[in-house]
Amino acid sequence: MARLELPQTSADLYHSFRPNIVDPESFEVVTGRGNPPLADAVGKLLDRNITQPCTDFADGETAVQVEPNLRGRELFVLQSMTPRPNDRIQEMVLIADAASRGDARQTSAIVPYFAYARQDRKTRSREPIGVAAVANQFYGAGYGRIFTVDIHSEQAEGAFPRAWDNVLADNVLIPALEAEGLEDPVVLAPDMGSTKRADKLRAKLGKDADLAIVHKRRDVDKHDHSNAVAMIGDVRNRDVVINDDMISTGGTIYDAAMLAKQNGARKVYASAAHGLFVPKNGITLPERVLTPDSPIDKLFVTDSIEQGELVTNNPERIQVVSIAPVIAVAILCYLTRDSIGKRLIEFNSSSSDQK
Ligand code: R5P
């Protein structure tokens, strides 16, 4: 199956589009305070300085002043909505408002990690649909597009009345996984909700890969609490790749890894687009992965969320793969009216996944 070729340098990036098609004066990129290293990486690829316009007032309100002139120009606001997602969302809203008042031509939200995405439906009476509420705020603030990586459920796109493009992170995770020399791989969906995503990864890994599924039971009365109760599929003496959109406390992926090992898996690789790594009982998933009895042999995440040294300094057990080239290509697609579907999605999807 075809593999996505991603540019690793600014020259590669611009060369992959028609030379000179992008007028550097036609656009600006700014970032909130969600993930400065990712903004630097994207800035290097786009060959421009990405400025950060947010500061705080003494009472905790966010202050914004966008430095570059925006009149008649496209503005891309790059922001992963963590840490403190509510603050990151407010930064995005204020930047869009500043852009409208600064006469920007169009403002796009480039949000590798979109918070509230798991609140995608009512599970009980009198609950909000969080992702719709945030998307509505973005529309009201003036965003004309949203770009995300591995949004929890693609139906979220329906909550925004303009273009919402979502790209899977497996495009950058697969080469890293394949470099491990997977033998007889099985992709394990850590819950029913991730089955479709896991099956897409299985198809991209090749015809010999199989699918297995964990049945997870969630306690709706307790946030961040679930139990893996059973597994469908055969993982005995096979390399298992667990894939999820995000890791929060790590309970879901760790339990799935335990089940895989108990069922005879040879090696277990855990992979996710977004590594939030929230502590559970005082310990984060990366800390658990680094213990000698961990059922996870290696963990892979993208840099959609800024990581500390524990994650970035243990490449034998934890690998961080950059999503920056995907974001840079998406921005150039918007600027050149090229197809994100053709460049970043369709080349290895079934026709039903195309957009
Ligand atoms: C939920 O269905 C998501 O796809 C993830 O499986 C979940 O958010 C992971 O949470 P945790 O790491 O806390 O188990």
Image: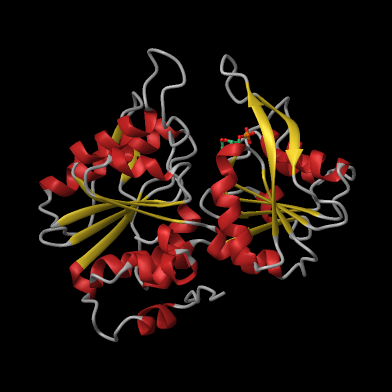
Q: Is residue 136 above or below residue 110?
A: above
Q: How many marks?
A: 0
Q: Quadrant of residue 139?
A: top left
Q: Is residue 122 above or below residue 3?
A: above
Q: Quadrant of residue 337?
A: bottom left
Q: Is the image coloured rainbow, by chain, by secondary structure, or in one colour?
A: secondary structure
Rendering coords of residue 317 (x, y %): 77, 55
> Does residue 142 appear in this view?
yes
- Relative placement, left or right, of 174 versus 67 is right
If the image is split into quadrants, where does the N terminus sit? bottom right
Rendering coords of residue 353 (x, y %): 42, 58
In front: 46, or 274?
274
- Relative placement, left or right, of 115 versus 315 is left
- Relative placement, left or right, of 288 versus 5 is right
In front: 135, or 83?
135
Residue at x-position 19% and y-position 71%: 25
In front: 308, or 172?
172
Residue at x-position 16% and y-position 59%: 69
Q: Is residue 180 above or below residue 289?
A: below
Residue at x-position 57% and y-position 14%: 221
Rendering coords of residue 61 (x, y %): 31, 28
Q: Quadrant of residue 21?
A: bottom left
Residue at x-position 63% and y-position 48%: 308
Q: Quadrant of ligand 1?
A: top right
If the image is split into quadrants, where does the C terminus sit? bottom left
> Does residue 302 appear in this view?
no
Rendering coords of residue 193 (x, y %): 56, 38
